[in-house]
Image (cartoon, rainbow, N blue to C red):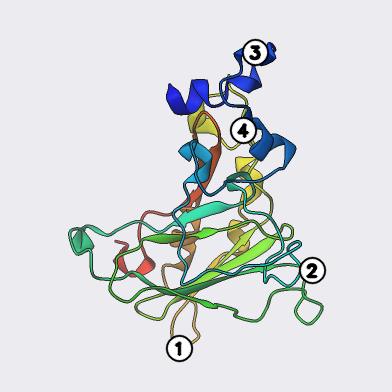
Amino acid sequence: MYIHELQYNHLHETDLNLRFNPYVELIHDDLNMNTYAFSVDDAVGFMSELGDGLVFTVGGPKGLENEQQFSYADGFSLAIGVPKSMEGHANKPLIKKYGVCALNHDPADRDCKMDKQDVVMPTNSQIAGFRVGTVPSYPIKVRFTDLDDNVYTILVKAKFAACTDDMDVSKCPANRPEIVDKAECSVVTSKGQKHAKSNDWCLNANPNQQREKQLTKNYLSFPQPVGYMD
């Protein structure tokens, strides 16, 4: 109640004298900031993201590798699933590295044919997925490499569309059939050959959403890495 109803009561309270915390409205609405040093509304302010440091800029986003502001609505988390044989082994990784490329963005590689996996995952932690943050535009190609050096490539054609409150969350996102191009999905072995179970793995792509009161989080889920499929 404190976080959702009180901190955000400016969304429905028209009487200025009854607004619980005008600071929340100032930060999120007036200044269009995601969070601030002392966040009293962790629904939006809490971010659990992989990183190895901080980058500071003064006067705007100029010079940042990604100049787009972070937004849960604009990205998604890709989950590959934890195989039963790996359950309980929290120190054993599942993914080596990953990368994201927006089509028609880099003049030198408009089709994202180059394998740009620039994020290296921890080697002592079982993280069964990663977050694709706010990107310049869609469509995008997402690639990641598992422990057997299989390279997965997924073409995400469109941004996840939010469902209305009256829709069944199991049917969200609203544009589910349009998000992943399964025909352009592939798994290639370390020898550069298409994996025997590539098509089966790609068919399991499942775009879905988790609705919270102040935000909606998007997911692209798969049951398990290709090497553990029956």
Residue sitting at x 46%, y 72%:
52
Which of the numbered marks, if any, corresponds to residue 191? Answer: 1
Label 3 sits on a secondary structure element that is: helix
Which of the marked residues, 4 or 1, is nearer the chain's N terminus? 4
Circle 2 or circle 1, nearest the eye: 2
Which amino acid, by three-letter code, is at mark 1? Lys
Which amino acid, by three-letter code, is at mark 3? Asn
In the rendered structure, the answer to whether residue 105 lies left or right of residue 206 reads right
Marks 4/1: CA–CA distance = 56 Å
Q: Position of residue 178 (x, y in %)?
A: 66, 46
Label 1 sits on a secondary structure element that is: loop
Which of the marked residues, 2 or 1, is nearer the chain's N terminus? 2
Residue sitting at x 55%, y 37%:
216
Which of the numbered marks, if any, corresponds to residue 23? Answer: 4
Circle 2 or circle 3, nearest the eye: 3
Q: Residues within 10 Å of mark 1 (few under 14, many from 20)?
A: few
Which amino acid, by three-letter code, is at mark 4? Tyr
Q: Are marks 3 and 4 in contact (CB under 8 Å)?
A: no
Residue sitting at x 68%, y 11%:
15
Q: Residues within 10 Å of mark 3 (few under 14, many from 20)?
A: few
